[in-house]
Image (tube, grey):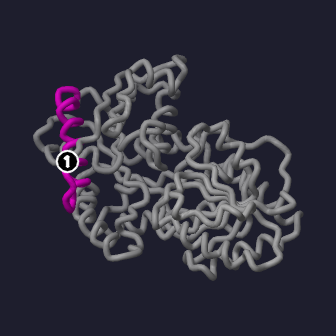
């Protein structure tokens, strides 16, 4: 297939779960023999990578993208809706490059708002290509923590609805994400349920063990919806108990939001991008904490499961496809009580049960959620839906 891959930034040039998903999916599409034209951006002030640099990073020159287009993400002065405006300008940049080539593509895979301008002008283009859109977690239709977030969500919603309705296909991780998309008035035959995945080389082949002090891990950005504040409160609650534990944090957590540095049971690793270094941290821990207020299908859960971690996560987005009582604890909401009880429950669990849960995490990834399996699922879904 000839594919235009319209990203919303791509790992490691832009950090985030959506960007890591783009990296893995785009890589697998090329490895499967597709001709892929990659569109991506970097943030202003960052190094603008060359075509050679991108291909070496993705494939170590083993193979390459058909074409690579990169720009700086448009910037403007701050005003309500500036992100939407800049996203629209980014979609115009993509459109201007794509316009004369549209007849050459079999499929256009679009992240977020990247196909906005193209979809607006769709009727002017005489071509049979199909556009599939992926907004990942649809957080703008999930729980809003505060008035500011609520306003941001309300501003995004009409434009997300418009893009979804104009696209040929809408990608969903499944579960509650499909419910959100259906509630936007999208026909069932337009929704393609394709879960996220992880590279096979992430799967841990080592013998699993449990630490003497059970080790909990948070991996992510310092973002209010991720539940870091609730984790901090849970740790403070536990500090008065005679329990064996450690808490590890990976991500750029501001100093003022960190707990007392004198407690040697709380360790901050900072931002870790290198996969080998990240795997080492996962392998040194036992339980991933992901008590988010809204999510899609978090890459950190896939990574943690692949390394054999037990998962404590909130039942949001498509998380319940990954987490069950066989490999963790699915909490209804990220309340202090729910998080604290889940942590205590695992601390008091016997080693045999914990090891079974760890093994279950790896087995589920190995059987269902590797990119080789998921990309085949994408081909099948697109093929069936196009008939």
The prevailing secondary structure element of the residues shown in magenta is: helix
Residue 63, given in percent of the width and then of the height, sits at: 50, 19
Query: Foreground: 1 or 26?
Result: 26
Residue that extends furthest to the bottom in the rendered view of this protein? 337
Residue 364 to residue 181: above or below: above
Image quadrant containing the N terminus: top left
Q: Report the residue at 21% width, 59% height from top.
A: 81
Residue that extends furthest to the left in the rendered view of this protein? 124
Q: Is residue 95 magenta?
A: yes
Residue 184, given in percent of the width and then of the height, sits at: 30, 67
Mark 1 crowdedness (10 Å alpha carbons): few <14, some 14-19, many ≥20 = few
Secondary structure category for the residue under label 1: loop
Query: Foreground: 346 or 359?
Result: 346
Q: Is residue 349 magenta?
A: no
Residue tagged by mark 1?
76
The quarter of the displayed image where residue 96 is located: top left
Q: On the picture, is 166 further left or further right than 327?
A: left
- Residue 98 in view here: yes
Q: Report the residue at 55% width, 77% height from top.
A: 333
The number of numbered discs placed on residues in the rendered structure image is 1
Residue 271, given in percent of the width and then of the height, sits at: 56, 47
Image quadrant containing the C terminus: top left
The quarter of the displayed image where residue 232 is located: bottom right
- Residue 387 in view here: no
Q: Which segment did they paint magenta?
A: 77-101
Residue 226, given in percent of the width and then of the height, sits at: 51, 64
């Amino acid at each position: 297939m000839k594919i235009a891959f319209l990203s919303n930034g791509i790992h490691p040039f832009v950090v985030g779960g959506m960007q890591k998903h783009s990296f893995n999916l785009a890589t697998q599409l090329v490895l499967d023999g597709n001709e892929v034209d990659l569109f991506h951006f970097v943030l202003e002030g960052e190094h603008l990578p060359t075509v050679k640099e991108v291909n070496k990073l993705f494939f170590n020159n083993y193979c390459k993208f058909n074409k690579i287009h990169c720009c700086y993400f448009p910037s403007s002065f701050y005003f309500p809706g500036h992100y939407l405006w800049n996203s629209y300008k980014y979609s115009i940049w993509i459109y201007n490059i794509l316009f004369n080539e549209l007849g050459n593509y079999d499929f256009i895979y679009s992240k977020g708002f990247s196909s906005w301008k193209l979809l607006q002008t769709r009727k002017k283009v005489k071509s049979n290509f199909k556009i599939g859109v992926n907004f990942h977690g649809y957080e703008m239709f999930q729980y809003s923590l505060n008035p500011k977030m609520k306003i941001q969500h309300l501003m995004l919603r009409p434009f997300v609805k418009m893009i979804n309705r104009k696209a040929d296909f809408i990608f969903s991780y499944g579960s509650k994400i499909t419910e959100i998309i259906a509630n936007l008035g999208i026909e069932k035959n337009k929704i393609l349920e394709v879960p996220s995945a992880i590279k096979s080389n992430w799967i841990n082949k080592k013998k699993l063990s449990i630490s003497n002090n059970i080790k909990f891990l948070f991996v992510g950005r310092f973002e209010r919806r991720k539940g870091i504040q609730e984790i901090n409160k849970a740790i403070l609650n536990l500090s008065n108990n005679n329990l064996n534990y450690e808490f590890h944090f990976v991500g750029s957590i501001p100093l003022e939001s960190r707990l007392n540095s004198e407690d040697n049971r709380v360790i901050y690793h900072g931002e870790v991008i290198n996969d080998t270094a990240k795997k080492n941290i996962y392998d040194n821990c036992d339980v991933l904490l992901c008590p988010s207020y809204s999510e899609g299908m978090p890459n950190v859960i896939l990574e943690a499961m692949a390394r054999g971690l037990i998962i404590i996560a909130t039942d949001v987005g498509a998380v319940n496809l990954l987490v069950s009582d066989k490999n963790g604890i699915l909490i209804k909401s990220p309340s202090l009580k729910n998080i604290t009880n889940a942590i205590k429950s695992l601390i008091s669990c016997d080693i045999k049960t914990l090891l079974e849960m760890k093994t279950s995490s790896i087995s589920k990834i190995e059987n269902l959620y590797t990119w080789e399996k998921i990309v085949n699922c994408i081909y099948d879904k697109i093929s069936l839906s196009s008939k």
